[in-house]
Amino acid sequence: MSVRHSRITGTGSYLPPKRLTNDDLAARLAADGIETSDQWIVERTGIRARHFADPDVGSSDLGVEAARRALDAAGLRPAQIDLIIVATSTPDMVFPSAACLVQQKLGIHGCPAFDVQAVCSGFVYALTVADSMIRTGAARRALVIGAEVFSRILDFKDRTTCVLFGDGAGAVVLEASEVPGILASDLHADGRHVDILCVPGNLSGGLVLGDPLLKMDGQAVFKLAVGVLEEAARAVLAKAGRTEADIDWLIPHQANIRIMQSTTRKLKLPMDKLIVTVDEHGNTSAASIPLALDAAVRDGKVKAGDTVMLEGVGGGFTWGAVLLDF
Ligand code: UT7
């Protein structure tokens, strides 16, 4: 078989069981004298609920559950996987990587396993790396996972950020294929915008130096996001020789329904081509795109042969898009 392409052959996802509605979260914040409301959160973001992992559950635990479901969907055993990439900004440990922990939990050994850290763009970065490795012959069957426990890095005294994020994981199996699959990708970063979305703390001498909780200038992120998501969408379509009319499903990073609807409008797509899970998941950073993709597949929306646009944007600043035939 001549291997020139990679193709998604299975998807899976996993949400920790603990679900908090906006009202649940508002009650928790009210205990500390912090005011928010279901109405504000829904109007500004589209979020209605999010899931939080228990304290003893790490990103690798969520990731391995999503991976097992993706493997089942692809009809593969863990031993058939020869590459594991985890996109995460909330790994279980400083090192080793969450990918090595996932590999261990799957009971397989020897294949390359590493994390990609591009915050909310992590999954489109990781998928692009896996696609490149498959096309060069370095791997044939990859697990590409987005897994996060953002609840661990939220400042529950900052209502402008803590209502936005949730925990979860999504995964795909990406296999070598004679037919494409991944059609094109377009990745970017601009480190001038480090400060608008960051967790500035670090470990030194056994202490946390600096603030280990998430900081965001929401309006600055919002403005940048709507611009770069449109640019990346157009760039990836041009690279693939396709047009907006070819897109069956748009799956952007699930951060804010207003940003997602703005991108959909700019691409002149009908709103029913937009996959939305932000209402139920909140912003799960690198996990949001594979979670949304899996939900769309299991809902019977995304079907074999459909053309799907994935788009990520987040801290770094990073952004990018992947166009694929499912
Ligand atoms: O994952 C990476 C990508 N991240 C994103 O895409 C996030 C992008 N940014 C956003 O989604 C939005 O900027 C936010 C949802 C974070 C904020 O929405 P906004 O429409 O930009 O609101 P704002 O920051 O302009 O705040 C409006 C008001 C302020 O009150 P005043 O100054 O008008 O009196 C805030 O203090 O809303 C207030 N506010 C809240 N009120 C109730 C901020 N957070 C809350 C809250 N509950 N949780």
Image (tube, helix red, strand yellow):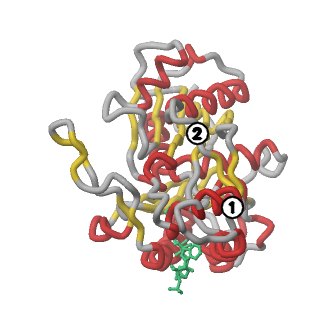
How far is mark 2 from mark 1, CA to CA?
16 Å
Residue behind mark 1: 22
Viewed as shown, does residue 233 lie left or right of 91?
Answer: right
Mark 2 C-beta closer than 8 Å to ligand 1: no
Q: Residues within 10 Å of mark 2 (few under 14, many from 20)?
A: many
What residue is at 42 percent from the left and 19 percent from the top?
Answer: 111
Above or below: residue 308 compared with residue 228:
above
Viewed as shown, does residue 254 lie left or right of 279?
Answer: left
Viewed as shown, does residue 202 lie left or right of 149?
Answer: left
Q: Amino acid at mark 2?
A: Ala
**Is residue 239 in view from this perspective?**
no
| Outermost residue toward the right in this view | 300
User: Depth check: 160 or 226 in front?
Assistant: 160
Q: Amino acid at mark 1?
A: Asn
Look at the image and tell me in which quarter the C terminus lies. Answer: top right
| Outermost residue toward the left in this view | 205
**Is residue 96 in view from this perspective?**
yes
What residue is at 61 percent from the left and 43 percent from the top?
Answer: 180
Q: Quadrant of residue 304?
A: top right
